[in-house]
Amino acid sequence: MRLRAEQLRVLRSGKEALSGVSFAVASAEIYALLGGNGAGKSTTLATFLGFLPVASGRVLVNGIDVARDLPAARSAMAYLPEAASLYDHLDARENLRYFTELAGLRCSVGDIDLALDRVSLTNEARGLGLRGYSKGMRQKVAIALAILRDTDILLLDEPTSGLDPLAIDEFHGLVRGLADAGKAVLMVTHDIYGACQVADRIGLLRSGQLVDQFAAPAGGRIDTQTVHRAFAAKAAA
C-alpha cells in the first residue's frame, strides 16, 4: 500500500479532530475521503504531510512512518491544495521551471511541454501570465507540476471546488489517467457525485470518524444514491 492510516487519532486546539481512522490506498487507485465541513478530511491530508502531529496510531507513506522520517515521506508525495500556489506574473512554463528547479529537478523545455500536453493546456495559454487563467487552467498547471515531479502518490484537497461541470469532468479524466498509470491518489471532497464518478473507493468521514466505506464494482462506478443515503443518514444520526 502506498498510503496507510492505522487507528489515527489527531488533536487540534485540544479537541479530537480524528478518532481511530484506518484506511489504505494502493497504487493505481483513487480513494476519496468524503464528508461535510469539519469532518476531518483536510486534517487527514495535513497529517500525511506532517503538518499535524499524531496523538496515537500512525500514518505510513510507502511504508515510511511519517513521524520518523518526514523528508522521505514527503519526497514520495505531490500535494495539490484547493487553491494552487502559483505565480500570477509568470506563465505556465515559467512556473513549472521555477518550481521544478526549487525541487532540485532538471527538466528541459521539452519535458515541461510534454507535461502540459498531458494536461491539455493549449500552446496559446502556455505563454500567458497566470493572472488571466481560470481555476481549471491553474489546476492543469498544478497537475503538470505533479507529473514532472513523478511521485508515487498524489494528494488532492477539494480539487474541483469552484470548477464548472465541464472543467470537473476534464480534471477527473486527468486524475483517472494518472491513477491508471500507477499513481496512488488520495482525494478529499464534499462532492458526492464527483467522488462516485472518479473514485475506486470512498471513505465517509463524520466528526473525525470513518463511518462507512464503498467500493466500485468491477468495470463500474460507485452508486451515487447509495452514498448519498449513507451521507444523509449519518448526518442525521
Image (tube, rainbow, N blue to C red):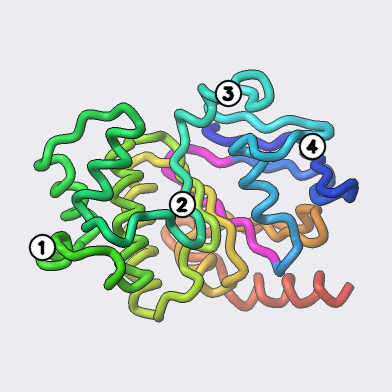
**Vertical comparison of 75 with 181: above or below:** above
For the residue pair 51 and 29, the one nearer the viewer reads as 51
Q: CA gap, disc 3 to disc 2?
A: 22 Å
Q: Earlier in the sequence, mark 3 or mark 1?
A: 3
Q: Tell me the quadrant of the picture where the N terminus can be found.
A: top right
Residue bearing mark 3: 63
Q: Residues within 10 Å of mark 3 (few under 14, many from 20)?
A: few
Residue bearing mark 1: 123
Q: Which residues are magenta?
A: 25-35
Circles 1, 2 touching at the beta carbon (< 8 Å): no
Give the label on residue 80, or none.
2
Does residue 29 show up magenta in the picture?
yes
Mark nearest the camera among 4 and 2 is 2
Q: Position of residue 10 (x, y in %)?
A: 80, 42
Q: Position of residue 163 (x, y in %)?
A: 42, 75
Q: Quadrant of residue 52 in the image?
A: top right
Q: CA gap, disc 3 to disc 1?
A: 40 Å
- The secondary structure type at the circle numbered 3 is loop
